[in-house]
């Protein structure tokens, strides 16, 4: 009987506390205080493989944008001059609203 109760508890726990099992794959990309930055953000898998573009644009100096990844990983490229090539190809974790300085 004791084992039946434990099994029932384990089966019902996710239904009783859904927020503990929810994933938050959001993060914030932050421009430096003194410069605008142009960014291309790609979704990425756990191995860092680049996926589709999930955001592209300018982040004004001192500002930030929020993105949501599929698996908690992104890759981004950036430039401080929109007429120059992008650089970086940086792989980072994107989860729980973490802040990522772009510079």
Image: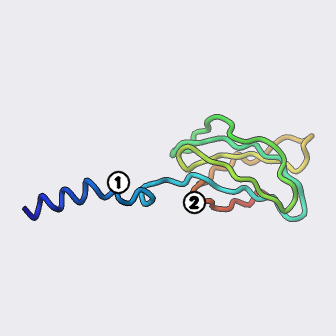
* Count of numbered circles on the image: 2
Q: Gap in Å between the C-alphas at discs 2 and 1?
A: 21 Å
Where residue 21 sits in the image (x, y, percent)? 42, 56
* Up/down of 96 relative to 69, above or below: below
The disc placed on residue 53 is: none
Q: Are marks 2 and 1 in contact (CB under 8 Å)?
A: no
Label 1: which residue? 15
**Closer to the camera, 32 or 5?**
5
* Residue at figure coordinates x 25%, y 53% from the top left: 11
The disc placed on residue 96 is: 2
* Residue at figure coordinates x 51%, y 46% from the top left: 46
Where residue 14 sits in the image (x, y, percent)? 34, 55
**Closer to the camera, 57 or 84?**
57
Where residue 3 sits in the image (x, y, percent)? 11, 61
Q: Residue furthest left?
A: 1
Say which quarter of the image contains residue 53.
top right
Q: Quadrant of the C terminus?
A: bottom right
* Residue at figure coordinates x 38%, y 60% from the top left: 17
**Closer to the camera, 17 or 79?**
17
* Up/down of 101 relative to 87, above or below: below
Q: Which of pointers 2 and 1 lies earlier in the amino acid sequence?
A: 1
Left or right, 4 with respect to 83, comes to left
Crowd around label 1: few <14 · some 14–19 · many ≥20 (10 Å): few
Where residue 48 sits in the image (x, y, percent)? 57, 44
């Amino acid at each position: 009987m004791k084992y039946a109760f434990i099994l029932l508890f384990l089966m019902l726990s996710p239904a009783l506390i859904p927020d503990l099992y929810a994933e938050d794959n959001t993060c914030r990309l932050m421009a430096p205080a003194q410069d605008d930055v142009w960014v291309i953000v790609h979704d990425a898998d756990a191995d860092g493989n680049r996926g589709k573009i999930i955001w592209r644009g300018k982040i004004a100096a001192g500002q930030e944008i929020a993105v949501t990844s599929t698996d908690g990983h992104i890759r981004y490229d950036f430039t401080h001059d929109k007429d120059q090539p992008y650089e970086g190809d940086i792989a980072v974790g994107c989860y729980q609203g973490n802040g990522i300085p772009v510079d």
